[in-house]
Amino acid sequence: MPVHATIAGVNYIGRFAPSPTGPLHAGSLVAALASYLDARAHRGRWLLRIEDIDEARTVPGAAEDIIDTLAAFGMHADGEVVWQSRRKPLYEAAFDQLGSQVYPCGCSRKEIADSRVALAADGAAVYPGTCRHGLAPDRQPRAWRLRVPDATDPAATIRFTDRWQGLVEENLATATGDFVLKRADGFWAYQIAVVVDDADQGVTDVVRGADLLESTARQIWLQQLLQLPTPRYLHVPVVTNAVGEKLSKQTGAKPLDRQKPLEELLAAARQLGLVLDGQPESLQAFWQAAVAAWARRFGSD
């Protein structure tokens, strides 16, 4: 699996990786804006990856709409857009490389929920390890899971410093348990796809929403097992609605207005707490002021 630490002399490679389940909204714009500004402030490359590996949730035409919306707002990828659904052989190769670290699981979601020992940060049940020593005779594989170290093993505790959230520490065994790499419906899970893609694209910095913070320890564990580099991470606060729910299509998020890109971008910058010099009256002026504000806050090198 090729890993490019630098491309054409550029030491920073970032990315925005939306799932094409609908149009971009204010919450997704904040994540896109943060990733774009971080790349530009570091004079690096900004890649766009369409995370359509969950084909059951993919909305036809949504990816193209996302790309067009980003362009209307002045965000253009530095290179070809990558589609996860076209990269399945890479995920298969990584899966095979993991060997005996992966095992078949015959548990249904209901069974896991009924036998749960705890809840993960995202509300899912921590996997109790039912199938990690082998399937029961009457069971068929439903999914494939990756082993994590036992709770008392020092390797189970993943530590990293997030550039926004600070020091993060998580014990994989108690926080999530063995986690799924290939789902019961045959689709590859998010964790393996994103790890493989980030490494293959040479991503040095991952900037995304804090709703994905709890996935990071699992991704670092996968990176360690696959002997892949670990990027720097920066997780921005998520945008919420009036009742405190994460803004999403399920909680009533409205599509971005392409006719008002400056207004939408200014609102996203406020969500990120950026203090812009002056009051930009054009997209060009906004980007100049926003990149400078981000560089002051998070540095550039």
Image (cartoon, rainbow, N blue to C red):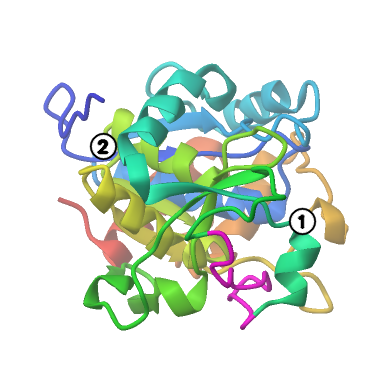
Q: Main secondary structure of the magenta part?
A: loop
Report the quarter where the N terminus lies.
Answer: top left
**Residue at image coords 64%, 59%:** 267
Question: Which residue is located at x 44 percent, y 16 percent?
Answer: 80
* Residue 248: mark in rendering: 1
* Front-most of residues 6 and 56: 56
Measuring from the top left, give residue 53's x and y in whole percent.
Answer: 61, 31
In-image side of 65 versus 176 (left or right): right
Foreground residue among 18 and 45? 18
Counting from the top left corner in percent of width and height, residue 47 is at: 41, 31
Tag 2 residue: 44
- Above or below — where is 136 with respect to 80? below
Which residues, given as a range, are shown in magenta? Answer: 117-131
Estimate the x, y position of residue 265 in percent, counting from the top left. 60, 49
Q: Earlier in the sequence, mark 1 or mark 2?
A: 2
The amino acid sitting under disc 2 is Gly
Q: CA distance from mark 1 to mark 2?
A: 29 Å
The residue at the far right in this view is 252
Which image quadrant is residue 155 in?
Answer: bottom left
Q: Helix, strand, or loop for circle 2?
A: loop
